[in-house]
Image (cartoon, helix red, strand yellow):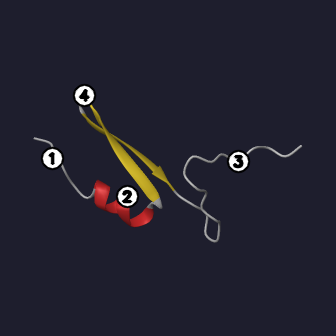
Amino acid sequence: MERLGGRGMLLVDAVADTWETRPCPHGKSVSACFHAPGAKPQTAGTQRTPKD
């Protein structure tokens, strides 16, 4: 029998700058964001646009 839980979310929480989960029919979907060292995090809802 496979385990239904583990250390996965603990690891995501430890290394990701932000993350979220959404329920799925067979578990959950996880999205995580990682900023480069020294990078300034963007404000939620903003997008970078290419410069001309």
Q: Residues within 10 Å of mark 3 (few under 14, many from 20)?
A: few
Among all residues in the image, which is located at the extreme bottom? 38
The disc at residue 12 is 2
- Reading the chain from its start, which is encountered first: label 4 or label 3? 4
Residue 51 rendering spot, x and y as whole percentages: 84, 46
| Residue at image point 70% right, 47% down | 48
- Reading the chain from its start, which is encountered first: label 4 or label 2? 2
Instruction: Name the side, left or right, on which 25 lies relative to 1.
Output: right
For the residues labelled 4 and 2, say whether their Cβ atoms are less than 8 Å apart: no
- Quadrant (top left, top right, bottom left, bottom right) of the C terminus: top right
The amino acid at mark 2 is Val
- Reading the chain from its start, which is encountered first: label 2 or label 3? 2
Q: Secondary structure at mark 4?
A: loop
For disc 1, the marked residue is: 3
| Residue at image point 45% right, 57% down | 18
In terms of image quadrants, where is residue 7?
bottom left
Residue 14 rendering spot, x and y as whole percentages: 38, 66
Instruction: Name the side, left or right, on which 34 lies relative to 48.
Output: left
Between marks 4 and 1 in the image, the one whose residue lies nearer the viewer: 4
Among all residues in the image, which is located at the extreme top? 25
| Residue at image point 37% right, 58% down | 12
- Reading the chain from its start, which is encountered first: label 1 or label 2? 1
Between marks 1 and 2 in the image, the one whose residue lies nearer the viewer: 2
Real-space CA distance between mark 1 and mark 2, rounded to the nearest whole angstrom: 18 Å
The disc at residue 25 is 4
Q: Relative to 49, does residue 35 appear above or below in the rendering?
A: below
Real-space CA distance between mark 4 and mark 3, rounded to the nearest whole angstrom: 33 Å
